[in-house]
Image (cartoon, helix red, strand yellow):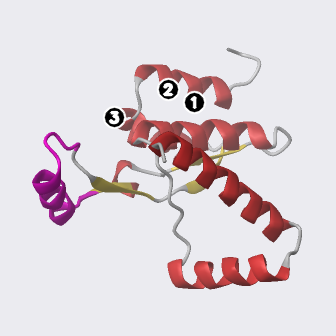
Amino acid sequence: MDGDIFDMRTDVALNAFLAAVEQGDPECARAWEEWSTREGRETYAYLTKDELLTEFAVTSARANPARPTVLLPSCADDIVVRQRHYYNRYLTKRLANPLPDAKQLVLFRNIPVPDSRILPEALAGVRESLSKHDLARVYVALTPGRG
C-alpha cells in the first residue's frame, strides 16, 4: 500500500475512534482510558516546532473571544529538543539519505492575553522557534480586529 494512502486511512480510523470515545462507546472509552493511563498526559503531534507552536497559539487565541487566553510556552526553556541518536544511527544504516530525528518537547501554559507581564515573556521565548510569517499569524490572532 502507498504510504500516503496508509497515512490517510490511519487518520480516518483515528478520527472515527475519537468520535466514538466522545459519543460514549464503552469499548473505545476503555481503550482510550488504558492508553491515557499508560502514556500519561503527553500528546504526540507530527509537526515541526514552528507548526506546533503556531497552531496551538492561533487556535487557542481564537477559541473564546469573551475570555481571551493563548496556549504558549511561558519561556524558551519550556521548548526542548532531545536528539534520538540511537534512532539516527539506525536510520543511517538503513537509508541512503535519512533526515535527522529528534523529540521536540513543549510545555504549554494557558496565558491570559491581557497579562502584560507573562504574555510578552512567552512571545519572546517562542520568537526563535517561529518563522516571521508564523510569528505574524500569532500576533494577528492575539489582536483580533487590529490586523
Label annotation for residue 138: 1
Q: Is residue 83 above or below residue 61?
A: below
In screen coordinates, is 14 left or right of 19?
Answer: left
Residue 95, position in %: x, y?
17, 47
Quadrant containing the C terminus in the rendered view: top right
Packing grade of label 3 (10 A; few <14, some 14-19, many >=20) is few
Residue kind at label 1, given as amino acid type:
Val
User: Rounded to the nearest whole Å, what is the CA distance between mark 2 and mark 3?
Assistant: 11 Å
Q: Is residue 25 above or below residue 107?
A: below
Quadrant hosting residue 26: bottom right
Label annotation for residue 128: 3
Residue 16, position in %: x, y?
76, 59
Q: Is 95 in the magenta?
A: yes
User: Rounded to the nearest whole Å, what is the CA distance between mark 2 and mark 1?
Assistant: 6 Å
User: Rounded to the nearest whole Å, what is the CA distance between mark 1 and mark 3?
Assistant: 14 Å
Residue kind at label 2, given as amino acid type:
Asp
Which residues are the magenta region? 82-99
Packing grade of label 2 (10 A; few <14, some 14-19, many >=20) is some
Residue at position x 80%, y 61% from top? 19
